[in-house]
């Protein structure tokens, strides 16, 4: 039996709730972009934070803020589907450490572009998870997104220089696509705050072994790391909340704001220049992902109206 979105029986949502969900995804994209840029800043130079350190900080900050929310709003913590909650946490832990590991090795715009293939992968997964049938638009969108990634990685030459950083970002995208479908599947039983808390709780053991090295002591760097964790908290909760009213394809289309925000923020905060070929690649890739996520799923057939008496 397919899960039913939370909010309205039968999975139907009024236009106002969908509008709010789209605004939540806009905010989520901006917060995700800021989180990635801050993680890139902290993992390079003399800050001393590794991908494992940043992953642990993200989960600990998220868990502490969640506990504060549960304290201030009794009744918010309502776990139901423990199997999917734990699955979400384990998958999310892999996403976080792989993505931070990629951000420590390749530019933020490049890492964001590769990682943002996860909406297309999520749509492919949703074909089997939610019974959506593929269309020619999905194949065309996938081809365009792949071309865009090739332009970014090859700096316009299409000679893919795939290294460990790029491979980590792509692996993070696969796990993120899995997480997106898991979140969509349990939004009918669990609220966004509960899902995020279990994301931190079950994800922390996954990333902890990568943070056994010496930790930095600079207080300013720690303040920036906490800001990174708070940005991640806002991004994740907003995205999870939006999945209660939107399908995987539509939510994925709005998440295309993330790599754009990330590239824009990386310019002033990291000094990362963007070549003309990379700009074309980002444009083509985002357009391809948007095409696949919006037009890829087959639209349901209209319900026939009752014949006149």
Image: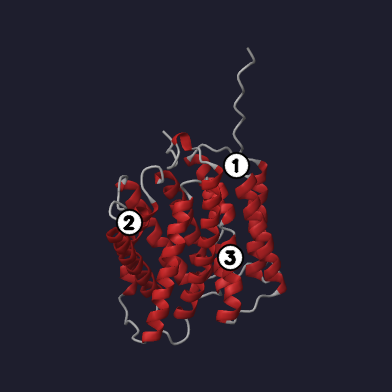
Q: Which residue is mark 1?
A: 297
Q: Is residue 39 above or below residue 289?
A: below
Mark 2 neighbour density, 10 Å: few (under 14) some (14–19) many (20 or more): many
- Asked if the residues shown at circle 3 and circle 1 are in contact, with their CB atoms under 8 angstroms apart, the answer is no
Q: Which mark is residue 198?
A: 2
> Which comes before the other along the chain, label 2 or label 1?
2
Mark 3 neighbour density, 10 Å: few (under 14) some (14–19) many (20 or more): many
Q: Is residue 54 visible?
A: yes
Q: Secondary structure at mark 3?
A: helix
* Residue occupying image coordinates x 59% and y 82%: 271
* Residue occupying image coordinates x 50% and y 66%: 31
Q: Secondary structure at mark 1?
A: loop
Q: Is residue 228 above or below residue 309?
A: below
Q: Which residue is mark 3?
A: 259
Q: Which mark is residue 10?
A: none
Quadrant housing residue 297: top right
């Amino acid at each position: 039996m397919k899960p039913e979105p939370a909010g309205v029986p039968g999975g139907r949502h009024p236009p106002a709730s969908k509008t709010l969900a789209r605004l939540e995804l806009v905010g989520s994209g901006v917060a995700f972009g800021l989180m990635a840029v801050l993680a890139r800043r902290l993992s390079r130079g003399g800050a001393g934070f590794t991908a494992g350190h940043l992953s642990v900080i993200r989960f600990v900050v998220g868990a502490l803020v969640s506990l504060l929310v549960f304290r201030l709003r009794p009744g918010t913590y309502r776990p139901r589907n423990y199997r999917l909650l734990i699955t979400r946490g384990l998958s999310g832990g892999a996403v976080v450490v792989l993505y931070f590991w990629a951000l420590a090795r390749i530019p933020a715009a490049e890492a964001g572009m590769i990682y943002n293939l996860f909406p297309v992968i999520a749509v492919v997964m949703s074909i089997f998870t939610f019974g959506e049938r593929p269309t020619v638009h999905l194949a065309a969108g996938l081809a365009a997104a792949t071309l865009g990634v090739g332009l970014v990685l090859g700096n316009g030459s299409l000679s893919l220089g795939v290294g460990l950083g790029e491979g980590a970002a792509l692996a993070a995208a696969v796990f993120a696509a899995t997480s997106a479908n898991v979140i969509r599947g349990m939004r009918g039983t669990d609220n966004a705050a509960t899902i995020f808390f279990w994301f931190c709780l079950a994800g922390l053991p996954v990333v902890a072994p990568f943070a056994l090295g010496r930790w930095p002591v600079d207080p300013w760097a720690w303040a920036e790391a906490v800001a990174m964790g708070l940005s991640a908290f806002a991004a994740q909760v907003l995205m999870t909340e939006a999945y209660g009213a939107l399908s995987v394809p539509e939510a994925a289309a709005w998440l295309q704001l993330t790599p754009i925000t990330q590239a824009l923020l990386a310019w002033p905060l990291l000094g990362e220049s963007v070549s003309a070929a990379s700009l074309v690649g980002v444009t083509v890739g985002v357009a391809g992902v948007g095409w696949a996520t919006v037009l890829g799923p087959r639209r349901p057939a209209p319900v026939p109206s009752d014949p006149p008496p």
